[in-house]
Image (cartoon, rainbow, N blue to C red):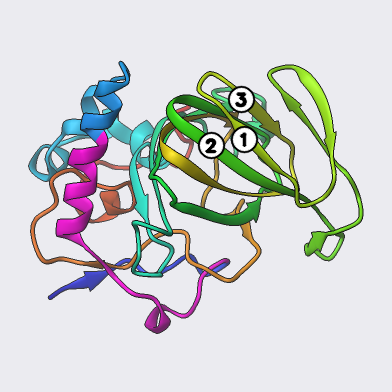
Amino acid sequence: MLRYKGFNELQGEPQETCQAMKRSQINTIMQNADDFIRSRGFYLPPFAYWTPEQWAVQGSEAQEIVENRLGWDINDFGRGDFEHYGLFLFTLRNGHPRNWQSQSGKLYAEKIMIVEDGQVMPMHFHWSKMEDIINRGGGRLALQLYNATPEEDLDHRRPVQVSLDGVAYTYPPGSVVRLEPGESISLPQRLYHKFWSEGRVLVGEVSLVNDDQRDNRFLDAIGRFPLIEEDEAPLHLLCGDYERFYRGQASSQGSS
């Protein structure tokens, strides 16, 4: 069976050490996620449901989706255990990192995510992106927090300062903050965080421009994008599939 899409070179393990996700598993996760999102009164945009055949005939009008990596994003971080170690994401809107240089276009991003009961998103921080993480409904979302040292290790000494819905809090390093539905936390740059759920949770993220190819610093060497075993046809494309299916001419200037 065909396998494609290696792990991000900046953050990933060597490709041969990572387990592939099956396309059939990804398709099932998509269907289940869409059902859950709709059950919470949230809806995905029309391009979420384009088939590979529809993608193949898209022209330059879809450049923003492709260049800014909007859309489906499912990962088990090479562990082969999505149920316990992974994340479902859908990027709803995003600008391009070069927008910061021109101070024009979209300088923000928004995602919707699902964290399954007991599923862990591994410890990481972002050099450039500040983000708000919002519990949009379901169970409770737990986050463990550490500052980063200058060497980018966990800082076990300095207290962590964060804002929860506009209220400032200071916590000992390694503290776990739990968000009930409707609550949110603002995470500044270089703040290590991992999160998991206590009950299935719909999670929102509102942030500065998102750059998953260059702006994730994982504490452990893991991959950001999955290797895929093509055991059946894609239901819908992951953002990492666009290069194979999209035929439009991507602009070097970007869309937004």
Q: Which residue is mark 1?
A: 178
**Where, by quadrant of the figure, is residue 1 drawn?**
bottom left
Spatial separation of the CA atoms under disc 2 and disc 3? 10 Å
14 left or right, relative to 24: right
Residue 74 in the image: above or below residue 163: below
Question: Can residue 111 be spotted in the picture?
Answer: no
Give the x, y percent position of residue 30. Answer: 22, 42
Q: Which residue is mark 2?
A: 141
Give the x, y percent position of residue 127. Answer: 71, 48
Spatial separation of the CA atoms under disc 2 and disc 1? 6 Å
Q: Residue at x 47, y 80 (%)?
A: 14
Spatial separation of the CA atoms under disc 1 and disc 3? 9 Å
Q: Is tag 1's residue or tag 3's residue first in the polypeptide sequence? A: 1
Residue 5 in the image: above or below residue 133: below
Give the x, y percent position of residue 110. Answer: 49, 28
Residue 209 magenta-highlighted: no
Q: Residue at x 38, y 32 (%)?
A: 64
Query: How many marks are shown on the rendered structure?
Result: 3
170 left or right, relative to 17: right
Say what secondary structure mark 2 lies in: strand
Q: Is tag 2's residue or tag 3's residue first in the polypeptide sequence? A: 2
Question: Can residue 113 be spotted in the picture?
Answer: yes
Q: Which residue is mark 3?
A: 184
In the rendered structure, which amino acid carries the disc numbered 2?
Leu
Q: Considering the whole magenta stretch, tell me its main secondary structure.
A: helix
What is the span of residues highlighted in magenta in the rendered image?
A: 11-33
**Where, by quadrant of the figure, is residue 31 drawn?**
top left
The local crowd at label 3, few if under 14, some if 14 to 19, many if 20 or more residues have their Cα within 10 Å, is many
82 left or right, relative to 27: right
